[in-house]
Image (cartoon, rainbow, N blue to C red):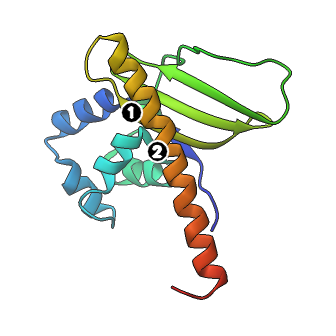
């Protein structure tokens, strides 16, 4: 399966856009031929496929710049001149993005909400996002094994 390019989105911008248009996320999802939860799931992951954004532009006049994440994430960890696996943890006011890279290329990422302003909540969010990366990768491995064995 081919990976599509994704746009990192600012969920608040998308929600404001929906409110200004008088639309519900489920409405927009089904109008673009997807399930009712599609846009909500994209917002939860804070990424929307570029092809979907272009479709929303054709349907509603939505531009990529209207919803794209504008502020660069604050990097809490960065390795320079490092080959192999790396981890990036980006902390936002209400969420954490945990990214695993190989030779500088993203191979898996996951988001997690930060419950409150405590340090423990931040650590819990980082731990949860890291665990989600594992579970997503595990699911891909299971699907690949099933496909190899013609299970599904």
Secondary structure at numbered mark 2: helix
Does residue 8 show up?
Answer: no
Work out which quarter of the rendered image holds the N terminus and state it: bottom right
Residue 127, image x, y percentages: 45, 31
51 vs 113: above or below: below
Q: Where is residue 15 in the image (x, y as percent from the top left)?
A: 24, 34
Who is closer to the viewer here, 33 or 78? 78
Query: Could you tell which of marks 2 and 1 lies nearer the N-terminus?
Result: 1
Q: Which residue lies furthest to the bottom in this view?
A: 150
Residue 53's label in the rendered image is none
56 or 91: nearer the eye?
A: 91
Q: Residue at x 13, y 41 (%)?
A: 22
All told, the count of numbered labels is 2
Question: Which residue matches tag 2?
Answer: 132
Going by the image, does 11 lie left or right of 19? right
Which of the 4 quarters of the picture holds residue 17?
top left
Across and down, in percent, residue 113 comes to 33, 29
Q: Is residue 60 left or right of residue 136?
A: left
Q: Residue furthest left?
A: 22
Query: Relative to residue 53, is residue 44 drawn left or right?
Result: left
Q: Do the residues labelled 2 and 1 touch (CB within 8 Å)?
A: yes
* Residue identifier under label 1: 112
Residue 131 in sight: yes
Nearer to us in this view, 127 or 50: 127
**Which residue lies at the image location 42% right of the left edge and 21% below the top edge?**
123
Q: Position of residue 5 (x, y in %)?
A: 59, 48
Q: Residues within 10 Å of mark 2 (few under 14, many from 20)?
A: some
């Amino acid at each position: 399966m081919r990976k599509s390019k994704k746009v990192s989105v600012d969920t608040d911008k998308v929600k404001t856009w929906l409110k200004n248009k008088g639309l519900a996320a489920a409405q927009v999802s089904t109008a673009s031929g997807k399930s009712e939860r599609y846009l909500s799931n994209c917002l939860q992951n804070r990424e929307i496929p570029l092809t979907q954004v272009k479709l929303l532009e054709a349907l509603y006049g939505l531009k990529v710049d209207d919803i794209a994440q504008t502020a660069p994430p604050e990097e809490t960890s960065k390795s320079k001149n490092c080959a192999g696996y790396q981890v990036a943890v980006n902390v936002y006011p209400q969420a954490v993005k945990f990214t695993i890279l190989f030779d500088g290329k993203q191979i898996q990422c996951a988001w997690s909400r930060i419950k409150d302003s405590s340090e423990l909540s931040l650590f819990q969010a980082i731990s949860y996002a890291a665990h989600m990366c594992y579970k997503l990768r595990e699911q891909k491995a299971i699907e690949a094994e099933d496909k190899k064995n013609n299970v599904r």
